[in-house]
Amino acid sequence: MWNRHSFKAMSDHAWDDLWLNARIATMAGDGWGAIEDGVVAVAGGRLAQVSPRADLPRPPAALARRVHDARGCWITPGLVDCHTHLVYAGNRAREFELRLEGATYEEIARAGGGIRSTVAATRAAGEAALFEVSARRLQRLMAEGVTTVEIKSGYGLDLETEIKMLTVARSLGERLPVTVSTSFLGAHAVPVEFDGDAEGYLDLVIDTVLPAVAEAGLADAVDAFCEGIGFSAAQTDRLFQAARRLGLPVRLHAEQLSDLGGAGLAARHGALSADHLEWLSAEGIAAMAAAGTVAVLLPGAFYFLRETRLPPIADLRASGVPIAIATDCNPGSAPVTSPLLMLNMACTLFRLTPAEAVAGMTRHAAAALGLGASHGTLEAGKVADFVLWDVEEPAELAYAIGANPCATVVRGGKVRSA
Ligand SMILES: [Zn+2]
């Protein structure tokens, strides 16, 4: 091997890595952006060239220090899961079981179920233990090609635990080879100690928790649950004004169970995304289109809650609102750690095309995190996050159920070990 190293030292390669013999779905523009017999070149952790092999200016060995054979795999951008609540303690399997045995919501609440059980478990968990259970969930997402993930707080609902959740989310991004974007979701639910006093709790969020989170640099965005069982449009507006005073972008859980006009409100605040949207109105769609707000659809929650009202897909499409797809990984309504299953459900339940579904977990998901300029497509200059899939055609990513054809993940130019 010594002579190969000395050859490397003597040579003057423009690129660090060059992947040959690939079929590439760049996801740039509409559709797959497919390149047959393609090459991906990486320099300094960024994509240096993504093109047909015929466009290479010189023989591969003269261009890159390391030349890899992609063995005919399809290469897509690394998957971006732009909506998760994966940091939490405990689980709600017992509640799932009770409901199937016929228990009512009141009985489940009396038995300590619902979001309050997750809040209690998350408050009680030590930071190290919370990291461990969350890392296990994140590793399942990563095993299916996720290179960027959004993680929300919102199971603390007090200063100490919201900070703990976001600290764990940040350390996941530091200790695992994945990019983490955080959202502060203090306005997720009203905690038991503020029962019947949503305004009082919101004062705590706006006056104390949000400023502390922003000061510590723990949030990349601010989120809320705008719903009859969550916070009103007026309360959400108050929170968003505070977020924007702190220079933080906003996103919103909106129109999941009813139409409170949340998506339109979020769009008027320049929101990165509005998420769920089963009850989204024509006014909401128009406001989102005007603001460039991404529609994040969550087929796992739709499925798990056995919802029947579909988000207005055709109208979103017709209005040019970008559609993203995410797992919504959470213990109550979407105990999902399979992004590939979400691609399938986006097609089977929401009737997206496979290319739309994959764009929803790459290009549009990156935009929903404000990372559209650097992530989400395979184009020169962007971060070299990509996945080699052992499939004959890219539609298989959305077609198959329970398969995981993820062969190799490259993150920041480096091959990520399993
Ligand atoms: Zn959510």
Image (cartoon, rainbow, N blue to C red):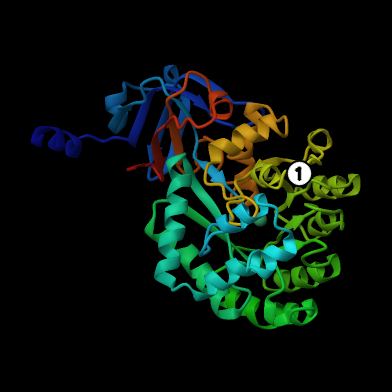
Left/right placement of residue 108 relative to residue 26 reads right
* x then y, percent, for residue 356: 66, 31
Q: Residue at x 26, y 36 (%)?
A: 12
Q: Nearer the viewer, residue 192 or 278?
A: 192
Q: Dividing the image into four equal quarters, which quarter contains ligand 1?
A: bottom right
The image shows residue 69, relative to residue 410, as above or below, that is above
The image shows residue 260, relative to residue 402, as above or below, that is below
The C terminus lies in quadrant = top left
* x then y, percent, for residue 41: 40, 32
* Quarter where residue 324 is shown: top right
Q: Residue at x 44, y 74 (%)?
A: 126
Whether residue 387 appears in this view of the structure is yes
Q: Which secondary structure lies at badge 1?
A: loop
- Return the residue found at the far right: 283
- Return the residue found at the far left: 2
Mark 1 lies on residue = 307
- Return the residue found at the far front: 101
The N terminus lies in quadrant = top left
Q: Nearer the viewer, residue 20 or 278?
A: 278
Left/right placement of residue 362 relative to residue 24 reads right
* Quarter where residue 104 is shown: bottom right
Instruction: Name the amino acid type tagged 1.
Output: Glu
* x then y, percent, for residue 374: 54, 46
